Image (cartoon, rainbow, N blue to C red):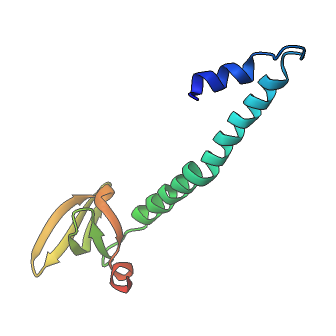
Amino acid sequence: MNFLTLFLQTTAPAQGQQGGVGNYTFLIMIVLIFVVMWLFMIRPQQKKQKEMVKFRDSLKKGDKIVTVGGIYGTVDEVKGNILLIEVDNNVKIRVDKASVVKDFNDAQQQ
């Protein structure tokens, strides 16, 4: 049974029945599916993104970080959306704040 057949059966009134009861049931099921999808997929992702933005905005000199590319370093300077991180003695690279994924101390504990 494909989706079109199921849709037509739920929306078409059966013989001897009033039309509309199947329509409401189908619509309620679709709405419930979207609500469950929002609760389990979209909402947690939005929460995670807010935490990541908060973390990136709170970066300051001396914080140990890990970038998306797996580069471990210490924040040396913060200028807007650009970080200057020290990866070794007197070796500094410039990266975008969006490339920072986590705190180095959190990475060590895992």
* Residue at the image point whose x is 60% and y is 54% from the top: 40
Residue 25 shows up from this direction? yes
* Residue at the image point whose x is 9% and y is 74% from the top: 91
Q: Which quadrant of the figure has residue 32? A: top right
Where residue 33 sits in the image (x, y, percent)?
A: 66, 41
Q: Is 20 rendered above or below residue 1?
A: above
Q: Is 108 rendered above or below residue 75?
A: below
Asked whether, in this view, residue 77 is left or right of residue 106, the answer is: left
Asked whether, in this view, residue 64 is left or right of residue 24, the answer is: left
* Residue at the image point whose x is 55% and y is 48% from the top: 42
Q: Is 7 rendered above or below residue 59?
A: above
Where residue 107 sits in the image (x, y, percent)?
A: 34, 79
* Nearer to the camera, 104 or 32: 32
Asked whether, in this view, residue 85 is left or right of residue 17, the answer is: left
Q: Which quadrant of the figure has residue 96? A: bottom left
Residue 79 shows up from this direction? no
Where residue 27 sits in the image (x, y, percent)?
A: 74, 29
* Nearer to the camera, 41 or 77: 41
* Nearer to the camera, 7 or 71: 7
Most distant residue in the left direction: 90
* Residue at the image point whose x is 60% and y is 46% from the top: 37
Where residue 58 sits in the image (x, y, percent)?
A: 43, 67
Q: So how many labels did they put on this image? A: 0
Quadrant showing the N terminus? top right
Quadrant showing the C terminus? bottom left
Q: Which quadrant of the figure has residue 92? A: bottom left
* Nearer to the camera, 77 or 65: 65
